[in-house]
Amino acid sequence: MLATLDPVTLTVTGVGHYGELVREIRRHRRPVDGALIDWVVVRNRNSAQRSSTAPVLCGCLQELALNAGFRAATGLQERAIYRDLFPRGLTALDELCETMPATDVEEASRLAARREVQGLIEGLKLPINDRGRRRAALRAEWFASHNSPLDTEILAGS
């Protein structure tokens, strides 16, 4: 449970026990190696039909993300293709015609699921290409040096 909500207004009233647990873990981790845990909360198994509370809950999640220090990402919808692939150890990114030639997976369903998974991967901003690896290296360099005093040699030479 990430947060407690007011049952009438659905506004965030506090951080839940899971949110507090992650905060505590992050507090203990920081002094050990100076690393900041990149906490990503993924809304998963979203329904294709939007409920009347979905926009309100998305807003609450964004508000909580700012307060608790995590990134919110859109997850995967509830799709039959995921239920068909998972027991076989496959994903929507796998080439199914080679792996599962006897299945009845619709191409449109597979393509929609593939786009959804690719969107989730992009939203996570993982260092899976050269640009991402450079970004991760620069981020690590900044975190390693952000507590160091400023170089005052440039000011002394003026």
Image: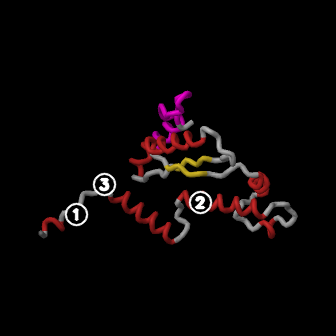
Q: What residue is shown with label 3? A: 147
Which x, y percent locates residue 97?
81, 68
| Marks 1 and 3, how far apart at CA | 12 Å
The quadrant the C terminus occupies is bottom left
| Marks 1 and 2, how far apart at CA | 38 Å
Q: Earlier in the sequence, mark 3 or mark 2?
A: 2
Q: What residue is shown with label 1? A: 151
- Secondary structure under tag 1 reads loop
Residue for point 18% across, 63% down: 152
Q: Quadrant of residue 107?
A: bottom right
Name the residue type under label 2: Ile
- Secondary structure under tag 3 reads loop
Q: Is residue 78 left or right of residue 40?
A: right
| Marks 3 and 2, how far apart at CA | 31 Å
> Which numbered mark, 1 or 2, is in the foreground of this view?
2
Which x, y percent locates residue 43?
60, 47
- The answer to whether 16 is drawn above or below residue 33 in the figure is above
Q: Residues within 10 Å of mark 2 (few under 14, many from 20)?
A: some
Q: What residue is shown with label 2? A: 121
In the picture as drawn, the residue positioned furthest to the front comes out as 52
Name the residue type under label 3: Asn
Residue for point 55% across, 27% down: 8
Which x, y percent locates residue 32?
41, 49
Name the residue type under label 1: Asp
- Secondary structure under tag 2 reads helix
Q: Which residues are magenta?
A: 3-25
Question: Is residue 78 highlighted in magenta?
Answer: no
Number of the label disc, if any, that sits on residue 59: none
Q: Residues within 10 Å of mark 1 (few under 14, many from 20)?
A: few
